[in-house]
Image (cartoon, rainbow, N blue to C red):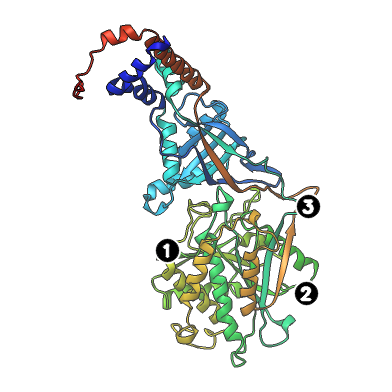
C-alpha cells in the first residue's frame, strides 16, 4: 500500500478536485454554521423582589440558576431556564411555565426604551408587574435589558430545533446533533436575609417667630424610596422622586422667607423625608413613635396639618386624599380652602379636588402616607396631595416609572402652587386682606426650575428601593447635606425590625451577573466521532485501493512540455 503514496500525492497535486472531496467537503459538513454570538456572554441581571412584610412572603424565593435555556413556547421546561421577552409574557403563561411545567428559572428581557411602547402595551406590562408580585414564585426570576447580543441568543434559543419540538424521531435526533444550546448560569449562592436592616429617615425644621413650643406646626412629608418588581431598576421618577424634589424646593423657598425677620412667620415648618414608604411607611411609623415617646422634644406637639406629597409631577389634577374631612373652623379646614382658592384664582389650569377615603383596617398595608398620621394616637390632621386619583392606579410603584423631562413644566407649576398655598396659610395673607391673586413666589423668589430639573435627573438615575440603602449610603449622605443647606436641626431617624417578630425582612443579591454559555449536546460528540471515523475509513480505503481509484478517475492533460533528449 505504502508504495503508492508518491503516486497518491502526485494525484493530489494534479487533481485539486480530489482535495476538495477528501478534505474541504468533510470539514464544511462537520463544522456547520457558526453563530456570531460569543461562546460565553456575560451580562447584568436584576433579581425580582424578595421581602417579607408582616410575616407575609413576597417575590422570588430563589437566586440560583444553572440550567439549559428554553423559550417560553417549548414543551419541555422542567428544570430549564425560560428565556422570554416581556412583550411575549402574560401572567397565565408565567404560571403555566413555573407551576405546571416545572421551569427552574425565568429570565425576562426588558426593552431598553419603554417610551416607544404604546399606552396599551405599557399598561399590560404594569399589570403583569403587579400580578407577579401577588403570586408565589419559588424559582429564581431575573430581568435584563435586551441588547444585540441577548437578542441573538434569544433568537438562537427560540429557533433552534430541539428534540422536544421535533415532528419525528429522526428529526429529533438530527436536531439534537445540529442545534446549539445555551446554559444559563448565575454564580451566586442563595439570597440571605440582610441582618440588622435599617430604614433611615431625615427630619429638618424651620422655626417661626416667637416661643417655639407655643407655635403651631405644619409638617411637609415625602417618602424618598421607590418600588418595582426588581429593586435595582426601581427609579420611581414620579413616585416619589417628584415628591422629594418638591419638598426640597419648598424647604429652599421657605428658608429664604424665614430668614427675613420682617416676615414674622407664626408657624413652625417641619420637613420630613421618610424611608420605607413602599413598605407600609415604616420610617414614618418610627418617627411618630419617637415623637410620642419623647413629648418634651417632639416636633409634632401642636400640629395644624401634615401635608404628604406623593406623585405630583404629572397632569393638571391635584387630589388631596384625606381619611376624614376637616371640620369647618379648624386650621385644617382653612388650609383646604386655601388650596381651593389659589387653584381658582392663580392656577386656573389646575383642578383641585379633595377625595375622602376611609382607612380599611382589614388591609395589611396602607394606601397613602397620611393614613399613618390618621392612625396615630393623637389623630393628627393629615392628607396626601397627588395627581393620582386612586392609590391602585397602574404605574404607581413600577419599574416603568422612569425619568421624562416633558413633565418638568407641570412639576414646577405644582411646586409653586403648593408654596403659594402654604405661604398664604402661614402668613395669614387671606385674613389680612391681601389680593387673592397675589403671588408670593415670583421674580427672585420664584421656583428654581434648574434646581428642580437637576434633582429630578439625579433621582431618575438612582435606584431607590428601600433594601438598597444602608446608613452610610452616598445617596442618604448627599440628601442630608442638601437638606442641611435649607433647614435646621437635621436629624436622622432609624427604623429597625424587631428580631423576634420583624415587621419587614429584606434579602440581599438584588443584582448580579449571568453567563450564557454556548454548548452542544452530548449526542453531538457521538455524531462528530462517527463522522471522523467514517472519513478516516474512506481515506484508508482510498489509499489501500489506489490502483482502482486511478483507473476510475480520468487523468489530466499535462500542460508541461516533454523534456528534449
Nearer to the camera, 305 or 143: 143
Position of residue 349 measured from the top left corner of the image (x, y, whole percent): 38, 71
The residue wearing badge 1 is: 315
Position of residue 502 measured from the top left corner of the image (x, y, whole percent): 75, 49
The residue positioned 34% from the left and 15% from the top of the image is 7
In this orientation, does residue 29 appear? yes
Q: Name the secondary structure under disc 2.
A: loop
The residue wearing badge 2 is: 297
In this orientation, does residue 425 appear? no
Position of residue 198 measured from the top left corner of the image (x, y, whole percent): 72, 57
- 285 relative position to 335: left or right: right
In the image, residue 310 sits, relative to residue 551, either above or below, namely: below
The answer to whether the residue labelled 2 contacts the one labelled 3, judged by CB atoms less than 8 Å apart, is no
- Please identify the quarter of the rendering in which residue 548 is found: top left
If the image is split into quadrants, where does the N terminus sit? top left
Q: Residues within 10 Å of mark 3 (few under 14, many from 20)?
A: few
Nearer to the camera, 164 or 248: 164
- How many circles with numbers are drawn on the protein? 3
Residue furthest to the bottom: 262
The residue positioned 34% from the left and 23% from the top of the image is 25
The residue wearing badge 3 is: 498
Find the distance from the CA under tag 2 to the CA under tag 1: 40 Å
N-term mark: 2 or 3 = 2
Q: Which mark is residue 290?
A: none
- 397 relative position to 504: left or right: left
The answer to whether the residue labelled 3 contacts the one labelled 1, judged by CB atoms less than 8 Å apart, is no
Nearer to the camera, 393 or 516: 516
Find the distance from the CA under tag 3 to the CA under tag 1: 41 Å
Q: Residues within 10 Å of mark 1 (few under 14, many from 20)?
A: some
Amino acid at each position: 500500500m505504502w508504495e503508492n503514496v508518491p503516486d497518491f500525492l502526485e494525484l493530489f497535486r494534479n487533481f485539486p478536485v480530489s482535495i476538495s472531496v477528501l478534505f474541504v467537503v468533510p470539514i464544511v459538513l462537520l463544522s456547520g454554521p457558526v453563530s456570531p454570538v460569543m461562546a460565553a456572554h456575560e451580562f447584568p441581571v436584576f433579581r425580582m423582589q424578595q421581602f417579607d412584610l408582616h410575616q407575609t412572603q413576597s417575590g422570588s424565593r430563589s437566586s440560583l440558576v444553572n440550567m439549559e435555556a428554553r423559550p417560553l413556547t417549548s414543551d419541555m421546561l422542567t428544570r430549564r431556564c425560560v428565556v422570554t421577552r416581556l412583550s411575549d409574557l402574560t401572567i397565565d403563561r408565567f404560571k403555566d411555565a413555573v407551576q405546571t411545567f416545572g421551569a427552574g428559572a425565568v429570565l425576562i428581557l426588558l426593552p431598553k426604551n419603554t417610551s416607544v411602547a404604546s399606552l396599551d402595551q405599557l399598561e399590560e406590562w404594569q399589570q403583569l408587574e403587579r400580578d407577579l408580585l401577588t403570586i408565589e414564585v419559588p424559582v429564581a426570576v431575573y430581568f435584563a435589558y435586551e441588547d444585540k447580543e441577548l437578542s441573538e441568543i434569544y433568537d438562537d434559543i427560540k429557533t433552534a430545533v430541539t428534540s422536544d419540538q421535533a415532528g419525528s424521531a429522526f428529526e429529533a435526533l438530527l436536531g439534537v446533533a445540529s442545534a446549539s444550546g445555551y446554559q444559563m448560569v448565575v454564580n451566586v449562592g442563595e439570597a440571605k436575609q440582610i441582618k440588622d436592616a435599617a430604614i433611615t429617615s431625615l427630619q429638618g425644621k424651620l422655626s417661626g417667630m416667637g416661643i417655639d413650643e407655643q407655635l403651631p406646626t405644619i409638617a411637609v412629608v415625602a417618602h424618598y424610596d421607590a418600588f418595582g418588581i426588581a429593586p435595582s431598576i426601581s427609579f420611581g421618577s414620579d413616585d416619589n422622586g417628584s415628591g422629594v424634589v418638591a419638598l426640597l424646593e419648598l424647604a429652599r423657598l421657605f428658608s429664604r422667607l424665614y430668614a427675613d425677620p420682617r416676615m414674622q412667620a407664626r408657624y413652625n415648618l417641619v420637613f420630613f423625608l421618610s424611608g420605607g414608604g413602599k413598605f407600609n411607611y415604616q420610617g414614618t411609623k418610627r418617627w411618630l413613635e419617637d415623637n410620642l415617646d419623647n413629648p418634651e422634644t417632639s416636633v409634632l406637639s401642636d400640629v395644624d396639618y401634615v401635608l404628604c406629597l406623593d406623585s405630583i409631577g404629572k397632569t393638571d389634577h391635584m387630589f388631596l386624599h384625606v381619611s376624614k374631612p376637616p371640620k369647618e373652623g379648624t386650621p385644617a379646614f382653612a388650609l383646604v380652602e386655601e388650596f381651593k382658592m389659589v387653584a381658582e384664582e392663580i392656577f386656573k389650569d389646575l383642578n383641585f379636588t379633595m377625595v375622602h377615603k376611609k382607612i380599611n383596617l382589614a388591609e395589611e398595608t396602607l394606601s397613602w402616607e397620611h393614613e399613618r398620621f390618621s392612625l396615630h394616637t393623637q389623630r393628627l390632621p393629615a392628607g396626601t396631595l397627588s395627581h393620582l386619583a386612586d392609590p391602585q392606579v397602574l404605574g404607581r410603584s413600577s419599574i416603568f416609572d422612569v425619568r421624562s423631562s416633558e413633565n418638568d413644566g407641570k412639576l414646577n407649576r405644582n411646586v409653586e402652587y403648593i408654596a403659594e398655598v402654604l405661604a398664604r396659610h402661614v402668613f395669614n395673607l387671606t385674613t389680612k386682606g391681601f389680593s387673592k391673586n397675589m403671588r408670593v413666589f415670583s421674580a427672585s423668589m420664584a421656583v428654581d426650575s434648574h434646581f428642580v430639573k437637576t434633582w429630578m435627573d439625579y433621582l431618575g438615575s438612582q435606584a431607590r428601593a428601600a433594601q438598597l440603602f444602608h446608613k452610610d449610603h452616598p445617596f442618604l449622605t448627599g440628601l442630608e447635606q442638601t437638606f442641611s443647606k435649607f433647614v435646621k436641626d437635621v436629624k436622622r431617624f432609624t427604623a429597625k425590625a424587631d428580631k423576634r417578630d420583624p415587621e419587614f425582612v429584606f434579602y440581599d443579591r438584588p443584582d448580579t451577573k449571568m453567563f450564557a454559555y454556548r454548548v452542544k449536546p452530548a449526542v453531538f460528540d457521538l455524531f462528530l466521532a462517527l463522522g471522523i471515523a467514517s472519513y478516516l475509513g474512506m481515506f484508508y480505503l482510498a489509499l489501500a485501493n489506489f490502483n482502482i481509484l486511478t483507473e476510475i478517475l480520468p487523468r489530466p492533460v499535462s500542460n508541461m512540455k516533454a523534456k528534449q533528449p
